[in-house]
Image (cartoon, helix red, strand yellow):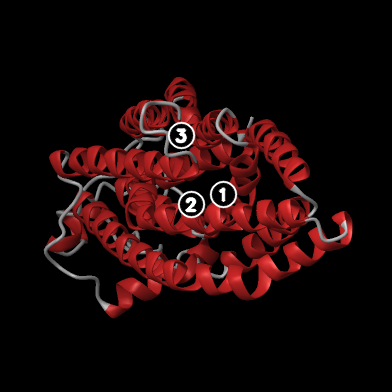
Amino acid sequence: MSRQLLLLAAVTRGASAACLRQPPMLAARPPLIHSFRMSTTPADKAPPEARSAPAALPPPRFGELLKFTVLAMPIYVAPTLLSLIDTAAVGQVSSVQLAALGPACGICDAISTMMVFISVGTTNAVSTAVGGGDRAAAKRAASVSVTTSFAIGCVVALLLSLSIGPLIANLVAPAAVASTVARTGGDTAAVAVTTQLWAACETYVRIRALSFPFSLALMSAQASCLGAKDSLNPTLATLTASLVNVAGDAALVLGPLAMGIAGAAWATVGCQVAAALVLLRTLRRKGMLELRQLPSADELRRFFAFGAFIVVLFVKQLVYNQAILLASILGTAAGAAHQCLFSIFRLCCTL
């Protein structure tokens, strides 16, 4: 997480000073959404439109960068802590559902991680525009990112909802049942527990899929705020999501409703929706969001310029999910223990 925050601070600082020192080899390479070029023509001989261009913001001081970094830290720590809270809550209800939470969270978290190009590209575009003093370009970059991210989330939610059932029924569950039969000698109770485990996994993923339009829009809104050197409002939105998730787990998992793993999924959906609405409202109030105009083809091309990064993240998540799948196939105890340890491992990696 430290490297992520330092990179984010460096991008923001570099964008603020972009019009003061732009390397020659990068001058012809436009940012993601908006590009600008510094003119070497003296101010008194420049054309009227160049003379009226907005002035660049001065580079931030060290104290400002430190404050920005400290306030941004909860944004990266919160998702891992929320996973630990979900793990603790579901573990109080059922060890089978706790084991099911491993592959279920692995699938959903892998998709979210592969969409991190949205955050990287949006931060780059907005910070470049803000650093050049062009608020209109920053607003357009944020608007394109939020609109496109929400659309991507809708597609992901639809595809995941349609594919998770056949994937588990035709591929994962038969392998898990075969492993259970081989380990237990065909014990009927053990086979029934394995079937229940993967049914719970499917339930969680189907519910959690509903959150992707809002979670990706939230990722875009957070990146837009960070690109505009605002780390306070994303942190407040993250705290809002945390409170909603804790309250949802208490009411839906441990409370009188006792929905188990389905309650944990609905709590996650609720916290993502609440945080997205809070932060989108903040962007709109700050004049950084306009959703009336759809993105153009050129804007979409620039938005997906960082999309190739998905390949690297896919390989990384594939390795992690192989371990989760293997632990789940080995039985309820192995799957539940792996989910607890893996949640702690993710927290340590984030820190």
Count of marks overlaid on the render: 3
Q: Is residue 19 visible?
A: no
The answer for how far apart the CA atoms under marks 3 and 2 are is: 24 Å
Instruction: Give, as a three-letter code, the residue at label 1.
Output: Cys
293 lies above or below 58: below
Depth check, mark 1 against mark 2: the one in front is 2
Q: Is residue 80 above or below residue 156?
A: above
Dot 3 and dot 1 residues touching (CB under 8 Å) = no
Q: Residue 21 in the image: state x and y as whole percent.
A: 46, 49
Check disc 1: other Cα within 10 Å, few if <14, some if 14-19, many if 20+.
many
Quadrant containing the C terminus is top right
Whether residue 344 can be seen here:
yes
Q: Earlier in the sequence, mark 1 or mark 2?
A: 1
Q: Nearer the viewer, mark 3 or mark 1?
A: 1
Image-quadrant location for residue 282: top left
Marks 3 and 1, the one that precedes in the sequence:
3
Q: CA distance from mark 1 to mark 2?
A: 8 Å
Disc 3 secondary structure class: helix
Q: CA distance from mark 3 to mark 1?
A: 19 Å
Tell me the element at label 1.
Answer: helix
Please rate how many residues cluster around mark 3, counting C-alpha atoms within 10 Å: few if below 14, some from 14 to 19, many from 20.
some
Q: Are marks 1 and 2 in contact (CB under 8 Å)?
A: yes
Task: Please state which amino acid type lies under the numbered disc 3.
Answer: Ile
* Residue 106 vs residue 206, the one in the foreground: 206
- Residue under numbered circle 3: 75
Q: Indicate which disc, 3 or 2, sits on the residue closer to the N terminus.
A: 3
The residue beneath circle 2 is 204
Residue 175 lies in quadrant: bottom right
Identify the residue at horizontal 74%, vertical 59% (top origin).
322
Q: Which residue is mark 1?
A: 105
Disc 2 residue type?
Tyr
